[in-house]
Structures are given as C-alpha cells and as structure tokens.
Image (cartoon, rainbow, N blue to C red):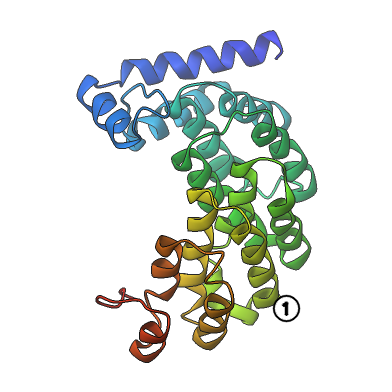
Amino acid sequence: MTPNTATAVDNIVTRLDQRAVAKTKAWWESYLKDEIEFRGVPMAGIRQSVNAWHDEVEPDHEFLEEVALTLLRQPVAEDKLAGILIFQEHLLPAHKTDWRADLAALEPVFDEGHIWDWNTCDWLCVRVLGPLADRNGEPCARAIASWTGAPGLWRRRAGVVAFVNLAARGDDFFEGFVDLLLDASDANTQDPERFSQTSVGWVLRELSDAEPDRVFAFVGAHREQMSKEAIRMAAARLPDRQRVELGVTGKRGRR
C-alpha cells in the first residue's frame, strides 16, 4: 500500500467514524453473530463518506481501484462496503474497468482471507460481480462461475451468488447460461457447509422463474447432496405438485 493509498483509506475511515452510531454497531454485530466487526455506519453514511472523499480528491481510475481493493482488505465491515461502493458507483459506471483485470485483482482478496462473512461476500456479488457479468456477457460469466473450483468457501459461494439477479433471465442472457448455472450449482452441492449449500438454493430459486422443470430435475437428482435448507430455498417457487414430490411443505415463496 502506497503512502497516498494509506492516506486515502485513513481519510475515508475518519469520515466513517464520524458517522458511526453505537446502537447500529451493536445491531449489526448481533445480526452477523459477531462474525465481523462493525463501526455502526448506515449504508447512506458509507455512501456519503465515499462520495465526499471522491469529490474532494478526484482520483484517477488506477488510484481509485487501489483504494477500493485496500478497503476490501480492512478488517471492519463498513470499510469493506466502502470498497464495494467505489467499484459499484464510481468504477463500473465509468466503463473504465477491464473485467479480466478486475477478477484477477479480486481473487486474492478472497483467497488471502479478507472476505469471511456472508454479508460482505453477497454485497460484492450483487453489487460488483453480477453487474460485471451482465455488462461483459458469457466470457466474464464463465470466468466467475469457474470460482466454484476455488480452494476457499467464500470465492466458491461468489461463483454462484454472483448470478442471483441474472438467473431469472435463463438462456435469454446467453445460450448455455442455464447449463452454466446448473454446473456451478452442482460443484457447490459437493460441500456440505451451509453457505455453499445456500448459494445453490438461492440461485436455483431465481432460476426457477425461467426454468422450473430443470430446477425440479436438478434438486431431485441432488437431494442426497443438498441440505434441507437449500432444497427448501430452491423449491420455494416451484409448482405445488413438484414441491410435494421433493418433500417440501409450506407456502410457496413469492415471485
């Protein structure tokens, strides 16, 4: 980390601390079961802190990305979310990112252990990785899905959760997208860990809007590998007949 980057991160962190609320900190740490430390800053405050720094410094692309990646490596939740917001609201909209370089830069953030909770992982998936795939299409999507072969849980989860907002489009996104999602889901069903399993349940639930029969067939073929929670999630929007066949009871999930 260069001195300039360290100064920028300190500047943003100082702004975050000025907006911290003890009650908010306590709520989030309880909700995340103390898996990660919080400062207690609402999302609006994180956005205000990032934007105020950005408007004051007017950083170029290279420096901005270095600051974002450094924030993602900080130990506190809001610092990581600030890094995600820089990607989402300043780098991606400017069309100045190279998806191959972006993925190469984000991989070690996962593999070095800087992402270890579902909240940070899923924010990065939904706000950065999904839009990156949406903009760049099949090659980028396949590269992200290949993360299901990564050594660490959270990058494997990201290799599926990145597509939760794209799954309902099915093969309208690109020909072969459904096969890609099912292959990625198959990879993550091999790990019994909860957050690997729920990555599958979540993306299959969204995919069922486009391909209910294929989701039904997948869950039926993988019932021995999938947790009950993942099966319930995946089947939440399937027709009642299919839910009964899968042994899922209760009301169907909302579309």
Q: Position of residue 149 (x, y in %)?
A: 74, 52
Classify mark 1: helix, strand or loop.
loop
Looking at this rendering, what residue extends furthest in the left direction?
23
Question: In the displayed structure, would residue 54 be above or below residue 1?
Answer: below
Question: Depth check: 146 or 5 in front?
Answer: 146
> How many numbered marks are there?
1
The residue singled out by tag 1 in the image is 176
Which amino acid type is shown beneath numbered disc 1? Gly
Question: In the displayed structure, would residue 70 be above or below residue 181?
Answer: above
Q: Position of residue 79 (x, y in %)?
A: 48, 25
Q: Residue at x 59, y 43 (%)?
A: 154
Within-10-Å neighbours for mark 1: few <14, some 14–19, many 20+? few
Q: Quadrant of residue 160?
A: bottom right
Q: Position of residue 16 (x, y in %)?
A: 39, 21
Q: Position of residue 1 (x, y in %)?
A: 70, 14
Looking at this rendering, what residue extends furthest in the bottom direction?
241
Question: Depth check: 230 or 137 in front?
Answer: 230
Q: Residue at x 40, y 82 (%)?
A: 238
Q: Quadrant of residue 135?
A: bottom right
Question: Depth check: 49 or 23 in front?
Answer: 23
Looking at this rendering, what residue extends furthest in the top direction?
3
User: Horizontally, is 84 left or right of 148 in the view?
Assistant: left
